[in-house]
Amino acid sequence: MTHAYPTPDAPLKIGTRGSPLALAQAHETRRRLMAAFDLPEAAFEVVVIHTTGDDRAMIAADRALKEIGNKGLFTKEIEEAMLDGRIDIAVHSMKDMPTAQPDGLVLDCNLPREDTRDAFVSVKYSSIAELPKGAVVGTSSLRRKSQLLNRRPDLQVVEFRGNVQTRLKKLHDGVAEATFLAMAGLNRLGMDDVPKTPIPTEDMLNAVAQGAIGIERRADDMRAKEMLDAIHDTPTGQRLAAERAFLAALDGSCETPIAALATLDGGTLTLRGEILRTDGSQSEAGQVSGPIADGPEMGRALARELLSRVDDDFFDWK
Ligand SMILES: NCc1[nH]cc(CCC(=O)O)c1CC(=O)O
């Protein structure tokens, strides 16, 4: 069954945060919908929603950010706007999405995934191994910090926030020797001039869902469902189902030291996962393979296996 498609007089409202990356992702979504339904750009309206997570005062409150990290700091206002009907669909970085959505909303559309790797960004060095003993590196990601300290206990990790330009300036000012950013974000922003080297996943395994865009809609909006089904990338959805089941079983978020990557080879899905102590003193990693449809169960099984190897205080991040 088909529905009345949006028109310039009654456009489909695409909700997004206002950051350059969020806008690029919203524009990619609009481009794919235009192509799939042969609609003009004016049939879509990109609506920027301000979120608590974008609040500068809130970002300064690092501790608060970490504690609220999984409670949808970046998504609450956007989801309210969708339930209110101010927007029809919402475009998100799946890495920042809690594993469960509020009643009345579904998140089952993914665009083709970008590079999942982290980038090593430095004006002097090209890999973690090249960093001199005791070097200062900047990141505000608990996962990256834990992985770095696990592999290189000599490094000094300092808080690094802000957009790519701010971080590069800090590198040029000598605040740190290197910082880390998702390759996906740099690629989607076309930032080809950033001095970056992709880090092999063996050295730094990505966050759950890194590099994937997800599009949320009201559960009862069948027109939005039909339109999003047409641009959904099934392999990305299958990989995320396994990674997010792993995350959900660990009760984690992108602000916790958890990493996972699912890959597909024919009908087989392989899931690699890692959990760490925040100080890097312990890392537990594992891998499972099986039929694609078993991805979520494999995610839960891998979480159980890794949890069975650690003490009760492992997840004490204070
Ligand atoms: N947590 C912030 C965030 N959420 C998504 C991305 C990048 C794009 C992606 O991974 O999909 C980033 C920035 C970063 O980690 O460099």
Image (spheres, grey):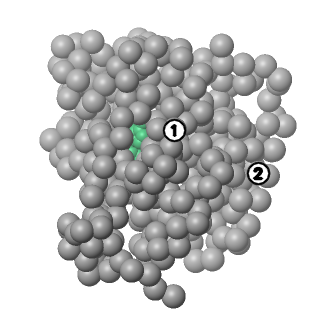
Horizontal and vertical percent for residue 158?
Answer: 41, 14
Q: CA distance from mark 2 to mark 1?
A: 27 Å
Near mark 1 (Cα within 10 A), the count class, few <14, some 14-19 or many ≥20, is some
Q: Residue furthest left?
A: 193
Residue identified by numbered label 2: 300
Q: Amino acid at mark 1?
A: Lys
The answer to whether any part of residue 67 appears in the image is yes
Q: Which residue is pictured at 53% across the width and 14% down the height? A: 63
Residue 142 at what x, y percent from top left?
A: 53, 25
10 Å crowding of disc 2: few (<14), some (14-19), many (20+): some
Q: Which mark is residue 76?
A: 1
Q: Does the residue tagged 1 have its C-beta within 8 Å of any atom of ligand 1? A: no
| Left or right of 261, for residue 93 | left
Q: Which mark is residue 274?
A: none
Q: Can the viewer see residue 271?
A: no
Taking the image as shown, residue 168 lies to the left or right of residue 199, namely left
**Which residue: 59% across, 34% down?**
70
Q: Secondary structure at mark 2?
A: helix
- Indicate whether 13 appears above or below 224: above
The picture quadrant where one finds residue 3 is bottom left
Residue found at x 50% / y 59%:
217
Q: Under tag 1, what secondary structure? A: helix
Q: Position of residue 113 (x, y in %)?
A: 42, 60
Residue 291, picture quadrant: bottom right
- Given the image, on which type of amino acid does mark 2 rest? Arg
Work out which quarter of the rendered image holds the C terminus and state it.
Answer: top right
